[in-house]
Amino acid sequence: MATIRELQGYGYAFFTVFLVFILYGYIHHLYKSEKTGRRDYEKYSKMALDDDIDDSPIEAIDSQEHKKDKEEQ
């Protein structure tokens, strides 16, 4: 019985450390993509404030991308 509890403790500790690495990796990805200019996450934070039907969209749809998506379907 003590062996099972010991294994559960090691598993819990390993899983916690694993999730911490995943979290820091995701945070690093967010900062890196915002720094390089791929995404501007502050625009997305305004979605909660500007959610009326007549508000402007966050990102404009590129007409060529829209046509390409329709052709693929």
Image (spheres, rainbow, N blue to C red):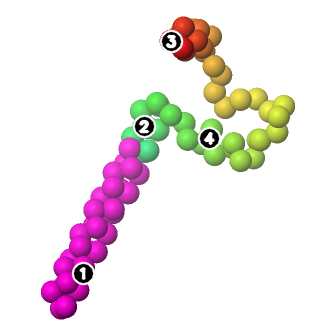
**Comes first in the chain, label 4 or label 2:** 2
| Prevailing secondary structure class for the magenta stretch in the rendered image | helix
Q: What whole-number distance in Å separates the C-alpha atoms at marks 3 and 1?
A: 50 Å
Asked if the magenta segment contains residue 40, the reply would be no
**Comes first in the chain, label 3 or label 1:** 1
Mark nearest the camera among 3 and 2 is 3
Say which element carries label 3: helix
Q: Which mark is residue 9?
A: 1
In the foreground, 72 or 26: 72
Spot occupied by residue 51 in the image (x, y as percentages of width and height): 77, 41
Residue underneath mark 2: 33
Amino acid residing under circle 3 = Glu
- How many tags in the picture? 4
Taking 16 as reference, is 27 above or below it? above
In the foreground, 15 or 52: 15
Quarter of the picture holding the C terminus: top right
In the foreground, 35 or 30: 30
Q: Is residue 65 visible?
A: no
Asked if the magenta segment contains residue 21, the reply would be yes
Residue underneath mark 4: 44
**Proximity of marks 1 and 2: CB atoms separated by less than 8 Å:** no
Instruction: Give the farthest residue toward the bottom.
Output: 2
Spot occupied by residue 55 in the image (x, y as percentages of width and height): 80, 33
Q: Which mark is residue 72?
A: 3
- Per the rendered image, the range of residues in magenta is 1-29
Taking 68 as reference, is 23 above or below it? below
Q: Residues within 10 Å of mark 4 (few under 14, many from 20)?
A: few
Q: Quadrant of residue 63?
A: top right
Describe residue 56's horizontal placement relative to residue 64 as left or right: right
Amino acid residing under circle 2 = Ser
Q: Quadrant of residue 66?
A: top right
